[in-house]
Image (cartoon, rainbow, N blue to C red):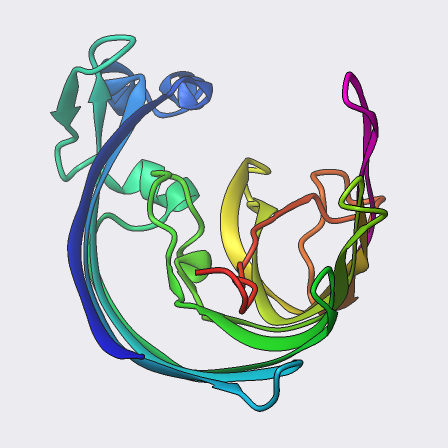
Amino acid sequence: MAGAYFQTDQLGLDAEANIPFLNFLGSIIPPLAPYLPVAATKGLSQGEHVYSVFGSLSWKATDHLKMNAGLRGSWVKKDFTTVKSYGTGTQLYDGFVPLPPAVAFFPAIFFGAPGTASLAQSNSDLMPSAGIQYQIDPEVMLYLSYNRGFKAGGFNGVSPFGLPENIEFGPEHVNAYELGLKSKWFDDTLLLNLDVFRRDYTDRQVNAVFTDPVTERPSVETKNAAISRSQGVELEMKWLVKKEFRLRANVTYLNSYYVSYPNAPQTRSPSTRRAVMVSSMCTSMPWWMP
């Protein structure tokens, strides 16, 4: 089997937020008082082009042995433009009047300079896959597989208050290994499937909480962790005790952890080093599934 794939898409977003905690500046800087509460807007536009070619080969070497191999190449190009501006929030929701130049620099002290920024990113990877399947008998099959997965990098741009140094993040890669057994026993009354797996991630994309060192405001941004690992065992069992009565069980043991995550962000409390993160998954489809 061989083929090619192309995708193009466009993402656009306009975000606006009021900043009422800066209202205290009205008593310190009287010329700013008529323009409170300060509001910020951020517009973004992202274009993406994805190109892929792929091929796979399946060989039934014997009546019992089957082997598979595949290769996929992907190229992802993204362009990103963001526009930030400051103004007065005239309503609780919506209502934005730009600040005059004489006072526009005050919120920039806390949230960065207004204006337009443009970035571009291009990622590519070759993703091989391979598998062996051995049919011990018509009802019992052993398999072993390897797959490499890839997820392109991108840009953080949703929050008007995101830190400028965290706008860009890189691609993620995974090497996935799987060893398992699929079987039926006792005249098809007992199904037993056992699977052992391991996924080694590099530059894994995770959602991390960052705190601005000046304002202490938190923001959630996607960043790259260096190395992480996810491994475990899955057991599936179904037993037809009798025609009217069935039992089934599914048990999974999962062990996931960061092997290396230098400069991981802290929580808001400086006394702790524990990073608050929500993992994103880079999926790798088992080779025997269509």
Up-down: is 161 above or below 6? Answer: above
Nearer-the-camera pick, 200 or 35:
200
Give the residue displayed 23% in from the left and 8% down from the top: 91
Residue 100, horizontal then vertical, whole percent: 12, 33
Q: Establish if 86 lies above or below 192.
A: above
Q: Nearer the viewer, residue 18 or 195?
A: 195
Examine the residues drawn in magenta and state their main secondary structure. strand
Q: How many marks?
A: 0
Q: Where is the N terminus found, in terms of image quarters?
A: bottom left
Q: Quadrant of residue 211?
A: top right
The answer to whether any part of residue 213 appears in the image is no
The magenta stretch is 237-257
Is 188 covered by the magenta stretch?
no
Left or right of 104? Residue 211 is: right
Give the farthest residue toward the bottom. 61
From this viewpoint, which residue is outermost toward the front?
A: 187
Q: Residue at x 13, y 23 (%)?
A: 97
Q: Residue furthest top?
A: 92
- Which one is nearer the viewer's eye here, 10 or 31? 10
Q: Is residue 189 visible from the viewing direction of this image? A: yes
Q: Is 24 placed left or right of 249 in the picture?
A: left
Could you tell me which residue is drawn at 59 percent across and 82 percent down? 66
Residue 46 appears in which quarter of the rendering?
Answer: bottom left
* Horizontal and vertical percent position of residue 181: 77, 63
Residue 252 sits inside the magenta stretch: yes
In the depicted structure, whether residue 213 falls above or below residue 136:
above
